[in-house]
Amino acid sequence: MCSVRLSTYEIILPLVGTDEKPIEGYALLVNGLYGAVDVVRKEDADKLQAGNLAGLSAALRERLMLRGHITRKDEAGELADT
């Protein structure tokens, strides 16, 4: 087991509305392995991309862990759960 990290299968995208325009201040988290899709504030998405997981609130870290966006497992461990 390793420390908490961003999932190997995480994709962080700009959030786009039905009018095809970006929704400022938000981002879309998509986990290709677990099928989790969540909206977070852009500043939190930036922290995730930078690996600054300690900069996230405890509640958000817990939610992202439950949804598979962040993990304590290495890549092989993530695949073993599928």
Image: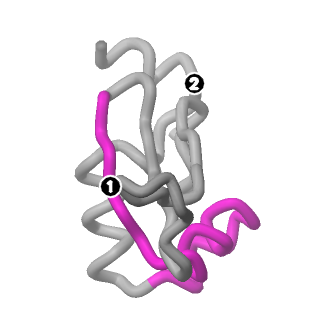
Q: Nearer the viewer, mark 1 or mark 2?
A: 1
| Drawn side of residue 44 relative to residue 70, left or right | right
- Residue 22 location in percent, x, y? 55, 65
Q: Can you identify the residue that label 2 sits on?
A: 75
Magenta highlight on residue 69: no
Q: Range of the magenta residues?
A: 35-56
Query: Which three-letter amino acid code belongs to the residue tagged 1?
Result: Asp
Residue at 30% from the left image edge and 13% from the top image edge: 82
Q: Hey, which residue is sitting farthest right in the picture? A: 50
Q: Is residue 42 above or below residue 57?
A: above
At horizontal 42% and vertical 57% (from top left) the residue drawn is: 19
Query: Where residue 61 appears, x then y in whole percent?
Result: 38, 70
Nearest the eye: 24 or 51: 24
Q: Which residue is mark 1?
A: 38
- On screen, residue 61 above or below 32: below
Neighbour class for label 2 at 10 Å: few (<14), some, many (≥20)?
Answer: few
Residue at 51% from the left image edge and 64% from the top image edge: 27
* Residue at 58% from the left image edge and 85% from the top image edge: 55
Q: CA distance from mark 1 to mark 2?
A: 21 Å
Lower position in the chain sequence, tag 1 or tag 2: 1
- Please determine whether, in this image, residue 43 is positioned above or below residue 75: below
**Amino acid, disc 2:** Glu
